[in-house]
Amino acid sequence: MIIDILSWVLLSLGGAFVFIGGLGALRMPNLYTRMHAASLTDTMGAVLILGGIMLQAGLTLATIKLAAILLFLLLTSPTASNALASAAILSGLQPKEGPVRPREKAE
Amino acid sequence: MELLGLAYYWVFAIVLMIGFYAVIAKPNLIKKLIGLSIFQAAVFLLYITMGKVEGGTAPIFQDGISLYSNPLPQVLILTAIVVGISTTALGLGIVVRIKEEYGSIEEDEIQERDRQ
Amino acid sequence: MIIILFGVFLLALLVITALAIVRTDSLFAAVILTGIFSLLMAANFFLLDAADVALTEAAIGAGISTVLFLGALALTGEQERGGSKSRLLALGVVTVTTLIVIYATFDKPRFGDPDAPVHQHVGPWYLEKTPELIDIPNAVTAVLASFRGYDTLGEVFVVFTAGIGVLFLLSARPAGRPEDFQASKVPHQGLRHYLVPRVVGRMLIPFIFLFGLYVQFHGDYGPGGGFQAGAIVAASIILYALLEGEAQALRALPMRVLKWLVAGGALLYGAVGVASMLLGSNFLDYSVLASDPIAGQHIGIILIELGVGITVTGVLLCVFHAFAARDKV
């Protein structure tokens, strides 16, 4: 019973984080801020959702496999974000400093 | 299950035709190949949909489960996926050679150059 | 109810991704979206109880296919010119055909109906005879490797033919003189200046390879088998080639080894068939490979799955190198 409630809480929180990450990836102004928002999905979302599922699986082989998946995700997603950001910098996309105005007025 | 079944068949029809539209309406050769692979994926979806049995599970024998989905469509589609990627690879090789010989991969430009 | 909602949601995502692929002008974006489309397809297959097919679609469609398309894009060009002459006619034809196909689907059996014609003939026979004749848990591998082993031999030869087809097309240098296969002369290759992907990638490559071997040999007991394992092992070596550069990857696993792999896998498969003929039974009848027919089936299945995996690995790597080592003209 308590495990069910706990896993419900973890799964809902994980889903909320994934939704926030997706919302951020849509609404953020440029690539770097979008990547920052999307990385929420890979880290908090993955940890909470996989934690919730691991609670449901109990102490079986499936839990160890899920833990291996979580470890793999935690290793590769930040690397992918790093590679993406390096590629963006090398191709010339500069991160904007300061607040971003919706339309740059010609001054 | 009624709505879900209809949804699967209708989505098969829609995705099939989206891929087909990319093949016939887009002049870029690589876009045609991508459309072809979307078309193939829709056909795979149809076969696997036909293989599902209500209340069954994946056809891997486990204790305590008596109803399994049909393994035959899955076998056919498994090999079809690999054959699909092989033909896509071959198609991409042809596209690369066309680009080197004709200088472009847009269908009308290639036909222009052929006519000259 | 939840299952229905979830299924319809995944299908809707599929349609949206397919529309986005067709509508976008940038081929690079279209290729990445195709990877997402393949992953959504894999999720749909998993919902439909096709675990093996989902694994294959994820490994090959979302992994290898993206790499091959990107390799071809690097040689051709990333922007689509767009625009075409007979768009309205194409749209009309497509709409009419969609309506016809949707009308045709009303005649199909109800989704999941156990009395549908497809579940009547051979399917239940395979499910019934597998524990008795072959005795492995994964019925899909049993059907693929043993009951329909001849079909799978043909598929391996198709993969082999595609591999040598690509080598025929792309081995000749752009000048037209066929030469020994060499890495391209572009000096800066690989991700040598990116420290984080290099370190993490090199750490992960042996584990990906190990997972590929696990999938290969565990195909009898769970989702897996030769095709998926070949794709995963090829992916690990492609990762090495992306990180260290094409020249280094060709030094680590030279082309002649890859050509031996391509031919060797198909040869192994055929050899198992001929061996069973020499032992007195039909072609590809594994029961005679050991004293006990079920043990013979196990041996036969492991050997031919190994052959399949070796050929798929070799072909995917040959195709990747054919694209990666070619200079852009």
Image (cartoon, coloured by chain):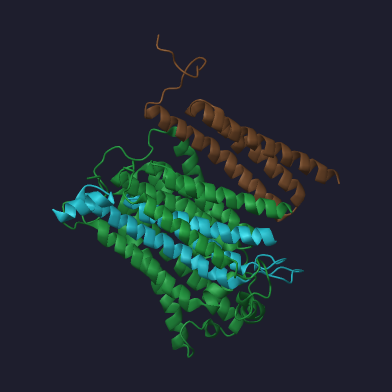
Chain colours: A brown, B cyan, C green
Work out whether residue C25 can be spotted: yes
Looking at the image, which is closer to me, A43 or B102? B102
Query: Hey, which residue is sitting farthest left in the picture?
Result: B116
> Which of the 4 quarters of the picture holds residue B67?
bottom right
Q: Residue C318 versus residue C280: which sits nearer the camera?
A: C318
Number of numbered labels in the structure image: 0
Q: Position of residue C80 (x, y in %)?
A: 33, 43
Please, is residue A33 above or below residue C264 in the view?
above
Q: Is residue C182 visible?
A: no
Q: Observer-nearest residue: C202 or C121?
A: C121
Left or right of residue C149: residue C129: right
Q: Nearer the viewer, residue B38 or A73?
A: B38
Q: Residue at x 30, y 56 (%)?
A: B93
> Where B68 sits versus B3, above or below?
below
- The answer to whether residue B26 is above or below residue A18 is below
Residue B80 position within the rendered picture, expressed as x and y whole percent measured from the top left:
47, 66
Tell me where residue C26 sits by quadrant: top left
Residue farthest along the bottom direction in this orientation: C280
From the image, which quarter does the C terminus of chain A lie in?
top left
Is B32 positioned to the left or the right of B53 in the image?
Answer: left
